[in-house]
Image (cartoon, rainbow, N blue to C red):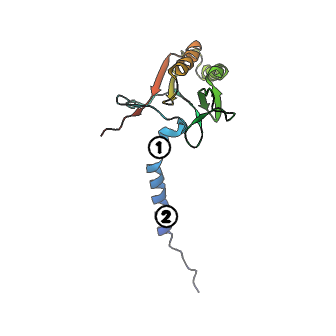
Amino acid sequence: MDNPEVDMTPMIDCVFQLITFFMLVINFESTSADERVKLPESEIAKPPKVKREDEVVINIGFIRKHDGTKRNPDGSTDNVDPLVFLNGEDIPVGAMTPRIKKDLQLYKLQHPGEAIKTVVKIRADSETPIGAVQELIKLYQEQKYEKFALQAMEAEQD
């Protein structure tokens, strides 16, 4: 009896279709987005025409219960302050200085003698007080960051 051969063409075809499907569906731009941050809508919000070369994405918002109410990390709902969601950590805005300094040291090691060209892109929850966003910008400015971008959702047209 001869060795039977298996026709692999249908399996290869199926694999290529799955690869194509996932390449079309995945959104690489949202890899730095945090789903806990609900961006405000704006009619003038437009994506940049050219992708920024060097940017840091900062998500600032709230921990929420399943019903959408804001809560503190300890579970209480009194005086809820916004947090920065950064690499799996929930950091109070006022405690960001050591993290910013650490990122700046890394930047200087990679770009010795250069001015800071990094754009700090801030994705703030629509309920985040503007004062918290301003405080975060001030902390970055104290470390000599000069370029900032605020992200909003493009309002849907009727």
Q: Earlier in the sequence, mark 1 or mark 2?
A: 2
Categorize mark 2 by other alpha carbons within 10 Å: few (<14), some (14-19), many (20+).
few
Q: Position of residue 125 (x, y in %)?
A: 51, 31
Near-viewer residue (12 or 105): 105
Q: Identify the disc placed on residue 12.
A: 2
Question: For the residues carrying marks 1 and 2, which lies nearer the camera in this image?
Answer: 1
Q: Residue furthest bottom?
A: 1
**Left or right: residue 72 compared with residue 36:** right
Name the secondary structure under disc 2: helix
Q: Residue at x 35, y 30 (%)?
A: 43
In the image, residue 25 above or below residue 81: below
Q: Identify the disc placed on residue 125.
A: none
Q: Position of residue 127 (x, y in %)?
A: 50, 29
**Left or right: residue 76 compared with residue 37:** right
Under mark 1, the amino acid is Asn
Q: Position of residue 51 (x, y in %)?
A: 43, 31
Near-viewer residue (39 or 51): 39
Residue 145 falls in image quadrant: top right
Under mark 2, the amino acid is Ile
Categorize mark 1 by other alpha carbons within 10 Å: few (<14), some (14-19), many (20+).
few
Residue 49 falls in image quadrant: top left
Write down the residue under mark 1: 27
Q: Residue furthest front?
A: 78
Q: Position of residue 136 (x, y in %)?
A: 56, 20
Name the secondary structure under disc 1: loop
